[in-house]
């Protein structure tokens, strides 16, 4: 999709991502003023080029921590949905669903909810604050010790065919706004040239 295809919040978001340079504070303020549904509409309009540019633009802009993905007041094991748009050729809409383990403040658990999960598996991961920066790391090399209520059975990402999608991957998340983050995927430490936007449900 391009700015010519869009109107309303999506069109305005794409127009801002088309500016040179992209102004991270303006993007943040714009997204913060939208409703939840408008934010989801906006981030799901952004394809590969805009996401790649936004990823670079928000480097060092603002800190994101686990508490921004699942707020401290959310009960342990309660699901928090993050609506997403990736830059893959197909099945671009998905969700990452997070929760806080019982009594655990050092990590979050999560999985990917998307159309092809019946083939790839749920793509379980463990998320931690990056000790070397102001970002969050989503590590597919580690999975939760149990499935929270309503989640699919925990499955290792080393099993085929999920291994080809999630194996050896670590995503890095950067803050865009209060509700929105952008991620970049790496496999075995090598950047994959693949990005995704997430919008927390509330």
Image (spheres, helix red, strand yellow):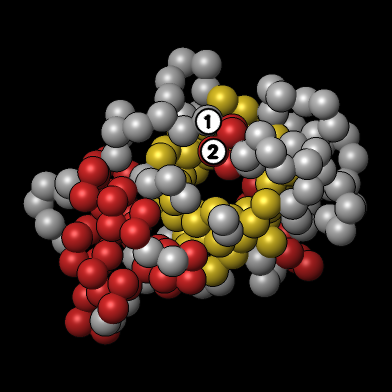
Count of numbered marks:
2
Image quarter hosting the C terminus: bottom right
In this picture, residue 15 sits left or right of residue 29: left
Quarter of the image for residue 121 reads bottom right
In this picture, residue 123 sits left or right of residue 131: right
Q: Circle 1 sits on which residue?
A: 65
Which is nearer the eye, 48 or 94? 94
Q: Is residue 184 visible?
A: no
In this picture, residue 169 sits left or right of residue 77: left
Under tag 2, what secondary structure?
A: helix
Q: In this view, does 145 lie above or below 47?
A: above
Q: Which mark is residue 153?
A: none
Q: Residues within 10 Å of mark 2 (few under 14, many from 20)?
A: some
Q: Residue at x 29, y 39 (%)?
A: 58
Tell me where residue 144 appears, x and y as whole percent. Answer: 81, 37
Q: Is residue 123 above or below residue 109?
A: below
Q: Residue at x 69, y 28 (%)?
A: 107
Q: In this view, does 178 lie above or below 15?
A: above
Q: Which residue is drawn at 89% across and 53% down?
A: 149
Q: Residue at x 41, y 29 (%)?
A: 63
Tell me where residue 126 appears, x and y as whole percent. Answer: 70, 35
Whether the residues at callouts 2 and 1 have beta carbons within 8 Å, the answer is yes
Tell me where residue 162 appears, x and y as whole percent. Answer: 73, 53
Q: Residue furthest top?
A: 132
Under tag 1, what secondary structure?
A: loop
**Cα distance, mark 2 to mark 1?**
5 Å
Q: Circle 2 sits on which residue?
A: 68
Q: How crowded is mark 1: few (under 14 residues within 10 Å), some or many (20 or more)?
A: some
Image quarter hosting the N terminus: bottom left
Quarter of the image for residue 142 reads top right
Q: Is residue 151 visible?
A: yes
């Amino acid at each position: 999709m391009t700015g010519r295809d869009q109107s309303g919040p999506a069109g305005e978001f794409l127009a801002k991502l088309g500016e040179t340079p992209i102004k991270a504070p303006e993007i943040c303020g714009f997204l913060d003023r939208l409703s939840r549904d408008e934010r989801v509409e906006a981030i799901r309009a952004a394809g590969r080029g805009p996401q790649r540019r936004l990823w670079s633009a928000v480097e060092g802009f603002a800190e994101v921590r686990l508490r921004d993905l699942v707020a401290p007041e959310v009960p342990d094991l309660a699901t928090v949905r993050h609506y997403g748009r990736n830059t893959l050729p197909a099945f671009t809409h998905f969700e990452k669903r997070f929760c806080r383990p019982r009594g655990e403040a050092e990590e979050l658990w999560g999985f990917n909810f998307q159309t092809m999960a019946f083939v790839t598996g749920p793509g379980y991961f463990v998320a931690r604050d990056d000790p070397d920066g102001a970002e969050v790391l989503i590590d597919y090399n580690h999975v939760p010790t149990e499935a929270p209520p309503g989640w699919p059975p925990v499955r290792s990402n080393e099993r085929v065919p999920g291994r080809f999608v999630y194996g050896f991957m670590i995503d890095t998340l950067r803050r865009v706004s209060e509700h929105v983050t952008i991620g970049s995927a790496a496999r075995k430490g090598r950047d994959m040239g693949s990005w995704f936007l997430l919008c927390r449900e509330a």
